[in-house]
Image (spheres, helix red, strand yellow):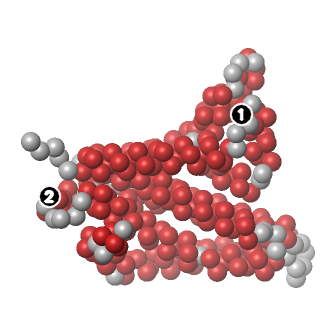
Amino acid sequence: MKQFLINPVLNKEFKLRFRSFRTFLGLSSYLVAIGIVVIGYILMSRLINGGSQFVRPEESRLMFMILAYIQLGLVLFITPGLTAGVISGEREKQTLNILLTTVQSSTSIILSKLTSSISYLLLMIIASLPFYSIVFLFGGVSPITLVKIFGFYLFSIFVFGSFGVFFSTMIRRTIVAMISTYGISLFLTGGTAFLYMITTGYTMSQNAAVFFPYIFAIFNPVMAFTVLFEPDMNEFITTQTGVSFPFIWSYFIVYSMLAIVALLISIKRLRPKMR
């Protein structure tokens, strides 16, 4: 752990990423956009309620859900772009061989690249916390829900960041690695939902085994995210699929295994085999 914290690769990546003016410009633009969404929603709710000076807890909860889904889209869209070029970019700049000749282990290099890449996204999410205080001002959402949501963000960033590092290690060209990572992310968010609806309709019409819809459901991050807001969603999935095991735990177990396998393969394939 000490070797990971006192790591020249990690320190260099942090300095290059956070000393750039574009980093703070992007963070400021994101916070301004989130602020416009929050203020715009409050103004629209007042107009709909006939100029009322009060915000009901139901409206505050809806505003919280809008913010949460916007940030989930941010995580699923930006994480592949931040991580898909960490290794292939070094290879294209012809600096990977120099990096591999240092005393840093493959594990240290991969974890340092992953940490430095997702740290910017973590900063954006943490910087948006003051906007969530508006929700607690008007009520409608418990602090436990907020903790669950941000825990889901951290887990999703780690998982999709691991996928990006995996493709960046396995594929030499950054653009191809980025396309592959975005393709996997798109399939896991949209493709699995489409397959879930198809298999659910087919199994219900044919009275066949309903385990396959459950498999597609546990790979969908949006459905797992919805379960955190609506506990009845878990009962709905259990009724349709017949699987009583908690849906959210299935999601965490499956994606934890996939992320760990992706990182282990990346670590193994980082250095070429030498006789």
Residue 85 appears at what percent x and percent y? 31, 57
The mark that comes first in sequence, 1 or 2, is 2
Q: Which residue, given by chain and number where applicable, does mark 1 sit on?
A: 243
Kindly identify the residue that appears in the image at 50 percent across and 59 percent down: 157
Q: Which residue, given by chain and number where applicable, does mark 2 sit on?
A: 97
The residue furthest left is 275
Kindly identify the residue that appears in the image at 85 percent across and 76 percent down: 55
User: Looking at the rendering, which quadrant does residue 161 occupy?
Assistant: bottom left
- What amino acid is labelled 1 in the image? Val
User: Looking at the rendering, which quadrant does residue 241 occupy?
Assistant: top right
Q: Nearer the viewer, mark 1 or mark 2?
A: 1
| Residue closer to the observer: 133 or 265 | 265
Q: Is residue 79 above or below residue 128?
A: above
| Residue closer to the observer: 96 or 81 | 96
- What amino acid is labelled 2 in the image? Asn
Kind of element beneath mark 1 = loop
Residue 192 appears at what percent x and percent y? 58, 38
Is 246 on the left or on the right of 168, as rendered? right
**Residue 179 in sight here:** no
Residue 52 appears at what percent x and percent y? 90, 79
